[in-house]
Image: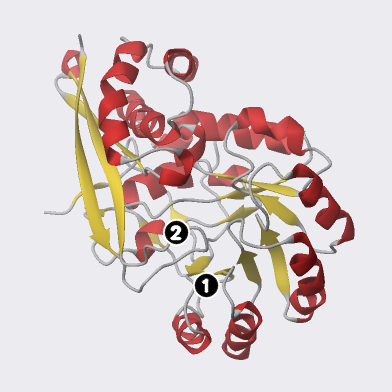
Amino acid sequence: MALTFRSEVRTIAFRDPFRIARDPNAATATTVLVELVDDAAAGLAGLGEGFPDAYYGETPATMAAVLPLLLAAVGEPEWTLDGLAAAGARMDEALGNNGAAKCALDIALHDLAAKRAGQPLHAFLGLSAAIPPTDFSLGIDAPDVVAERARRAARFPALKVKVGGPSDLATLEAVRAVYAGPIRVDANTAWTPEGALGFLPELERLGVELVEQPFPARRYDDLRWLQDRSPLPIVADESAVGIDDLDALVGVVAGVNVKLAKCGGVGAAKRMLERARDLGFRTFLGCMEETSVGIAASAAVASLADWVDLDGCLLLADDPFEGLVLDGECRWRLSSEPGLGVRRRA
């Protein structure tokens, strides 16, 4: 077989504690890195990453178990966009779900294909290098602590504030006191319909731009009920895992959050973003707490997004990769090098 791989589990500390409503861990991020070697191309290698989230049924152990099966399903792909799409389809046929494992291989395949073609990944995908700026995310903590982090992140054009704790209003008030730009609120499934409806006037008053996943996944009736009453766009995240979820969300929410680690990688994200736009959704491109490998792959499709939340590597105390650069407007500068344009730090 021409393709061989090795994987590595990395647990990396956060710069600041980062907690969301459905995950008590605030100290570290655990991700899985893949290197895919093409023996038929003088050992050329592609980098990939998948962030396992137990909420979606994945752990480093499940990824280790299924990666060989998925690579066997890929076989020896044609190194074109259609060929990689066919490889992704074979992975889906071999195994359902397991988006992070598929993501790791899919990113590595696209990195390798773009390197073989001598093109930056976004160009290989036929997409623009002009992308929106990223926001910066603030985890749940005491209001004064979150406000201090907001003050330090004031250069970002928008802040994404994690909510779902007992101090949501106090936190947002504290952030607004030190930050004048748009605030995006992400409840990660923690709110109730009645609580969310009562909170809407306060969110408007505080200049909140959007509300992400207020209720548990697939509570379509509750999401539609709130969106019908909300002047702010409601964005589905945990309810929008892959492209097959989109049709059920039409008329339910205004936007969807696409993440490579949920939907299965670069190719799947490109197709999901394009389909979401065709269906009339506003598109949000998000991330997990990934290294520069996952963020660079996401940035390659960011021209298809209205809103961008690609700050995962910025939350880490020690990103093991380099080459991805944030410009003065907080836009990721897409590499002119072939592939992802990132490399391991020496």
Disc marking residue 156 = 1
The spot of residue 184 in percent (x, y) is 63, 67
Say which amino acid is labelled 1. Answer: Phe
In terms of secondary structure, where does tag 2 sit? loop
At x 16% / y 16%, what residue is drawn? 39
The answer, for residue 335, to whether it is visible in the render is: no
Quarter of the rendering containing residue 91 = top left
Asked whether 60 or 86 is in front, the reply is 60
Say left or right for 273 vs 254: left
Q: Identify the image quadrant of the C terminus.
A: bottom left
Q: Identify the image quadrant of the N terminus.
A: top left
Q: How many marks?
A: 2
Disc marking residue 23 = 2
The spot of residue 138 in percent (x, y) is 49, 71
User: How did the renderer colour the structure?
Assistant: secondary structure
Q: Is residue 264 above or below residue 93?
A: below
Say left or right for 114 vs 37: right
The spot of residue 224 in percent (x, y) is 82, 48
**Front tag of 1 and 2:** 2
Q: Distance from label 1 to label 2 (Cα)? A: 25 Å
Of pointers 1 and 2, the one earlier in the residue sequence: 2
Say which amino acid is labelled 2. Answer: Asp
Asked whether 4 or 201 is in front, the reply is 201
In terms of secondary structure, where does tag 1 sit? loop
